[in-house]
Amino acid sequence: MHARVERFPLSRRGVVFRKDLGVFRLSLLVRIMIGLYVGSSFVGEAALAGSRVLPVANGSELQAQVKAAATKVIPAVVSIASMVMVRDQALSDEGLPFGLFKDAPARRQYGQGSGVIVSADGYIITNNHVIADAVDVEVILADRRQYKGRVVATDPKTDVAVVKIPASNLPVATWGDSSTLAVGEFVLAIGNPLGLSRSVTFGIVSAVGRADVGVADFEDFIQTDAPINPGNSGGALVTLNGELVGINTAIASPTGGSVGVGFAIPSNMARSAMQSLLKTGRVVRGLLGASTQDVTPLLGKVFRLPDVKGAIVTDVQAKGSAEKAGLKRGDVVVRFDGQDVMDSGHLKNLLAASTIGSKHRVDLLRESKPYQTELVVQEAPRERAKKSQAPSASAATAHPLAGIVFDDITAPLARQMDLSVTRGVVVTDIEEGSLAESFGLQPGDVVLELNRQHIASFAAFQRLADQMKPSDLALLLVNRQGSVLYIPIQAD
């Protein structure tokens, strides 16, 4: 599948952009294309507006509200042109990059996005991917004035960046409260799609709290059907009151153009990130101090959960917040300060937004029984030969572990496979089309537990595996390059 992109190439979580403005691919048969947009508002000056848009009586009133909102916000939305120096990549037969041409000279590549003025003295909020690695940033205002922009700070984990221009008495956007945004509410997307400045599109909020899009580490996106295209990244998503409720960031599309599935960073998340960036130069986040994963229908049955929601604790870090609060592997976090936890991403966002040192009530299910504890939030650290298959030869091919080759972790094997752990057994090969492959097990995974039983060696693993029947569930706890997760394997 082919699509054109307007900026320098980048890749994030399965999305690969070619440097010649060519192909990008995305897992799960949907391609997330990072567009370029612009949005504006100020960190400390604009108060959150408490009023919401009332239902309109007729089309004329709706049209009047749309026109008023657009008129109010357009002056605060800017165009951002960035320049980076790139080297051409060598491409595999499938068209995917696998390395750089070492002797290729660096060349200029230009990208264009959007931003939103957030203070009268020239602070602009945009996406990190709009200005990432840029050696030159030009900002063009709605009245066509042009300034050299200075990148103040960036946060790739939320895809937020702050740019400053030497200007004063600028129009600013008013921050809105994204937590009150409702599905079905009318919104406008304002930016510079395809280089067409001061463009406004209209639609509704299709969903809120959208995660697992694959754009950033912290995702809580607003989904909208207001048309968004390349060049809108960093632009404004506003209500009919003209309140900034989101920073447009990405689209999902099989073609590269708008198909009515766009994503915006909620204003509350973007504003918080910006305030932290301006205050400390980085985003200060809270940390659970434990690895978690989402509850699937099968895991819900295994852990005897009433609902398919919550976050399963898969590993607890020493001396972290979770350990001090008494959390254990296998606990399922279901509520945080009385708020239902939908999945691990939701819990991650709740912790990240918490004040360092603050105390919170955490409700768990431990062995399917309710358990409550108090957690004190800590600050996240700054960024820094084969054996036989586990089933015996007499086991039926329907065995849940059939088709997998395991081995003890020896020092040479650990070096060869770049393993960070020395206990358990490592998956060295998986048969194509096997049950384990379909459930997501991968070569290089280190199995720490089988059906909640600790694995010290291949022999111990073999004994447990030989006792299993083809219809049994194999619940594996694996370490995958430092991340610990449960993988349930079971035949239909």
Image: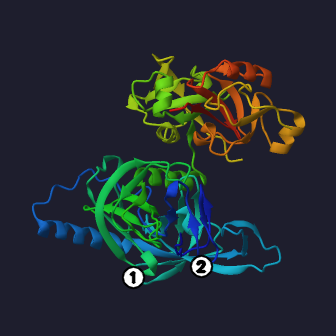
Mark sitting on residue 110: 2
- First in residue order: circle 2 vs circle 1: 2
State whether residue 132 is above or below residue 28: below
Q: Name which residue type carries label 2.
A: Tyr
Residue lying at 46% horizontally and 28% vertically, measured from the top left? 300
Whether residue 289 is visible to the viewer of this picture, yes or no, is no
Q: Position of residue 127 (x, y in %)?
A: 52, 63
Q: Which of pointers 2 and 1 indicates the residue nearer the eye?
A: 2
Mark sitting on residue 344: none
Separation of marks 2 and 1 at Cα, in angstroms: 22 Å
Q: Position of residue 479 (x, y in %)?
A: 69, 35
**Looking at this view, is 379 or 370 the one in front?**
370
The kind of secondary structure element at disc 2 is strand
Residue lying at 29% horizontally and 63% vertically, measured from the top left? 203
Q: Tell me: 327 left or right of 454.
A: left
Mark sitting on residue 143: 1
